[in-house]
Image: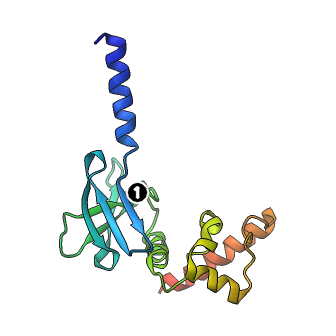
């Protein structure tokens, strides 16, 4: 294999390995699937058996700059999922609590999906959420049809409500 072909092969192998699934949160089954290399399933764990875990991210001077969030199976601590692949680092414990609450709401089929812009296009596909939206009269394009000012006001209201709820 020539040098160019080898570099192309190694580069494409690296890219396709990076694109393989790392974990899957399945709302319908309530399962967290953890993958190992080449897309093989390492473990399937009920979300109810998972606990949130925070790791501190320190800078070169030892100051805490952020937190990384993990899902860890309580019975098998080596079954861990790094949520940084989904959320990135979070700046505070308060933010981590908000993300954990969002995950809980997402995985609980007895509750509607979290009211997030990125999930709006899929709300009608979830039976619990579709029923909730029908009963409450939620507009299917609620987030997408907001003006910029209304969007900012809605986000601010959500932030205020969550700060009050999670600062206790």
Residue closest to the far bottom: 135
Residue 92 visible: yes
Q: Classify mark 1: residues with Cα within 10 Å, few (<14), some (14-19) or many (20+).
A: few
Figure coloring: rainbow
The x and y percentages for residue 127 are 57, 80
Asked whether 60 or 156 is in front, the reply is 156
* Left or right: 148 in relation to 37: right
Q: Residue at x 74, y 72 (%)?
A: 142
The x and y percentages for residue 112 are 56, 81
Q: Quadrant of residue 54?
A: bottom left
Q: Quadrant of residue 155?
A: bottom right
The x and y percentages for residue 85 are 41, 54
Relative to 40, is 80 above or below?
below
Q: Residue at x 45, y 56 (%)?
A: 88
Residue 116 visible: no
Residue closest to the far top: 2
Asked whether 148 or 47 is in front, the reply is 47
For the residue labelled by badge 1, is the local secondary structure a helix, a strand or a loop? helix
* Left or right: 46 in relation to 133: left
Residue denoted by label 1 = 84
Relative to 149, is 168 above or below?
below
Q: Count every numbered label the image shows and give the total.
A: 1
Q: Residue at x 31, y 49 (%)?
A: 39
The x and y percentages for residue 97 are 44, 75
Asked whether 86 or 41 is in front, the reply is 41
Q: Quarter holding the N terminus?
A: top left
Relative to 1, is 100 above or below?
below
């Amino acid at each position: 294999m020539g040098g160019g072909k080898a570099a192309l092969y190694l580069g494409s192998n690296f890219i396709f390995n990076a694109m393989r699934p790392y974990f899957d949160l399945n709302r319908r089954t309530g399962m967290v699937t953890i993958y190992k290399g080449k897309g093989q399933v390492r473990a399937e764990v009920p979300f109810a058996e998972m606990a949130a875990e925070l790791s501190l991210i320190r800078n070169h001077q030892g100051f805490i700059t952020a937190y990384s969030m993990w899902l860890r199976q309580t019975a098998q601590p080596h079954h861990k999922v790094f949520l940084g692949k989904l959320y990135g680092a979070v700046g505070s414990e308060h933010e981590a609590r908000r993300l954990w609450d969002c995950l809980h709401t997402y995985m609980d089929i007895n509750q509607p999906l979290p009211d997030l812009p990125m999930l709006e296009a899929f709300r009608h596909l979830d039976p619990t959420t579709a029923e909730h939206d029908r009963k409450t009269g939620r507009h299917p394009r609620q987030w997408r049809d907001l003006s910029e000012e209304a969007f900012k006001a809605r986000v601010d209201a959500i932030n205020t409500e969550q700060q009050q709820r999670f600062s206790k």
